[in-house]
Amino acid sequence: MKKIIFLIIFLMLPSQAIATQVVPILVYHSIEEFNGHGSKELFVTPQNFERQMRFLKEHGYTLLTFDRFREHDKVPKPIFITFDDGYKNNLNVFSIFKKLDSKNFQPAATIFVISDFIGRENRLSKSELKEMAKSGFFSIQSHTATHPKLTKAAGLEYELKNSKNKIAEITGKPVIALAYPYGNFNDRVVEETKKFYLYGLTTTPSLYKNRA
């Protein structure tokens, strides 16, 4: 692959009508009640998450995944919903999406999974990921193989290529997007990512960049 589109918390995209178009990306991790373990700020209760999704539904937003990235300028109020790490509690999202699915609102989200963590006690299993991908609600993408700081990793091929291949084998769907662990990247990481992915995401607020 010869180029990568580099994305952040929100996108600032060229528009023919005005100078820029803002496309938000809402980033989540765990969708359950905080139980005292982990970082509390990474938890959103299922009830709160459902309220947020109902807001998007009632206000005419279109939920996209990166498989449909090029539709962002063809649909009303485009927005991306993402989940990092592949926690088992993301099954709560599945239930909420089924509840909200309708003719006028098709829920969709991207789950960035850590491929070597698939099937651990608190992570989504292969069968769950396969079912979620098959549902049409979810695009399963890569958060690397072991979640290292890529700028400090000696070899990147295992983290990037092997995670991509493993996830694709499980879901039977293309893996085209990578979420950088900790939002951490540099020029070397971007160049390696270009070999395997079309999209690279970080959590550092700034403008959209097309790294051709």
Image: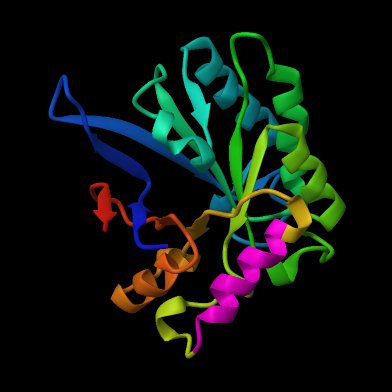
- In the visual, does 197 lie left or right of 169? left
Query: How is the model colour-coded?
Result: rainbow
View extreme (bottom): residue = 154
Where residue 145 appears, as percent x and y from the top left, is 63, 72
Which quadrant would residue 160 be assigned to in this image? bottom right
Up-down relation of residue 183 to residue 88 (above or below) = below
Looking at the picture, tell me which residue is in the foreground, 157 or 122: 157
Up-down relation of residue 204 to residue 24 (above or below) = below
View extreme (front): residue = 2
- In the visual, does 203 lie left or right of 43? left
Up-down relation of residue 79 to residue 6 (above or below) = above
Residue sitting at x 75%, y 47%: 89
- In the visual, does 105 lie left or right of 198? right
Looking at the picture, tell me which residue is in the foreground, 27 or 157: 157
Residue sitting at x 14%, y 23%: 18
Where residue 7 appears, as percent x and y from the top left, is 36, 50
Asked if residue 167 lies in the magenta stretch, the reply is: yes
Residue sitting at x 82%, y 57%: 126
Looking at the picture, tell me which residue is in the foreground, 89 or 3: 3
Which quadrant would residue 77 be assigned to in this image? top left
Magenta region: 155-168
Where residue 162 appears, as percent x and y from the top left, is 64, 73
Quadrant where the C terminus is found in the figure:
bottom left
Instruction: Give the main secondary structure, helix, strand or loop, of the magenta stretch.
Output: helix
Viewer can see residue 185:
no
Viewer can see residue 117:
yes
Quadrant where the N terminus is found in the figure:
bottom left
Image mark count: 0
Residue sitting at x 25%, y 36%: 13
Asked if residue 164 lies in the magenta stretch, the reply is: yes
